[in-house]
Image (cartoon, rainbow, N blue to C red):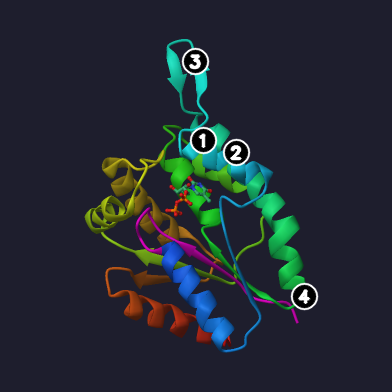
Amino acid sequence: MTGSFITFEGIDGSGTTTQARRMFDALVKAAVPVHVTQEPSGGPVGSIIRQIIQRRIVTLGRTGSRRPSWDTMGLLFAADRLDHLECEIEPNLQDGINVISDRYLHSSIVYQSVTSAQDGAREWLALINGHARTPDLVLQLDVQPEEAHRRRMERQTMVEMYDDPELQEKLSRGYKELFESLDGVNVARIDGSLTEDEVHAACMDQLRELGLP
Ligand code: TYD
């Protein structure tokens, strides 16, 4: 039997990394086969993306250094995703191992469309990600942008590409709109402002509906 594919989504500081790891630990403890991963992935394209996000690679435009545009980022994330699926996600699922990913497809749809000023961005992003399998369960951690900002300030050593508070507000609205309009995707919205233990318990409740652990 193939494994289940579970993804965590939310704005920066919503707790996706912590909760993905906690779910992984809980499944290991319950002797359920599981693999945890993240996007950007550890593969070649993912490494480039990380360097861009951390501003360690900049491109030079006519007026000085600039960030790659939303569509360039969209293509990089989509390429990383296909590589990630091929090398890591699909082989584990085929072996019956459940896979948890800290961010996946819906990060691209939300982050890259919100940072574009173009009509039709969301449709184009869906198109270039058309070969990416749909997760069995998407856990959206919903945290107020102010709370997420406070958490980022507590932990952060380096300001990253999408760290602007105004942008994070737009991303929060972007997630809400996306998940309200999506058909055929199993999404659970979790109140991410609860304590870490409560959020973890709510995520595990959703997992049980998939028949796990
Ligand atoms: P990372 O440092 O891993 O952030 P976090 O730990 O909060 O997930 O960097 C990932 C950043 O990249 C994060 O700001 C979300 C963004 N992102 C996209 O813009 N598009 C995508 O497709 C993915 C996977 C991430």
Instruction: Tell me if label 2 and label 1 are in contact, CB under 8 Å.
Output: yes
Q: CA distance from mark 2 to mark 3?
A: 19 Å
Q: Which residue is mark 4?
A: 95
Residue 52 is labelled as: 1
Q: Amino acid at mark 2?
A: Ile
Which of the two labelled residues, at mark 4 and mark 3, occupies the earlier sequence position?
A: 3
Query: Of residues 118 and 7, which is closer to you in this image?
Result: 7
Q: Earlier in the sequence, mark 1 or mark 4?
A: 1
Amino acid type of the residue tagged 3 in the rendering: Gly
Residue at 41% x, 61% y: name it. Answer: 180
Q: What's the CA distance linking mark 1 and mark 4?
A: 33 Å
Q: Disc 4 or 2, which lies upstream in sequence? A: 2
Q: Which residues are magenta?
A: 1-15
Q: Who comes first in sequence, dot 3 or dot 1?
A: 1
* Circle 3: element type: strand
> Hey, which quadrant is residue 48 in on the image?
top right
Q: Which residue is mark 3?
A: 61
> Is disc 2 placed on a helix, strand or loop?
helix
Please state the horizontal and vertical placement of residue 86, each as a whole percent of the image. 75, 56
- Left or right position of 159 against 57: left
In magenta segment, residue 8: yes
Residue ID for mark 2: 48
Amino acid type shown at disc 4: Asp
- Residue 158 position, x and y percent, is 37, 42
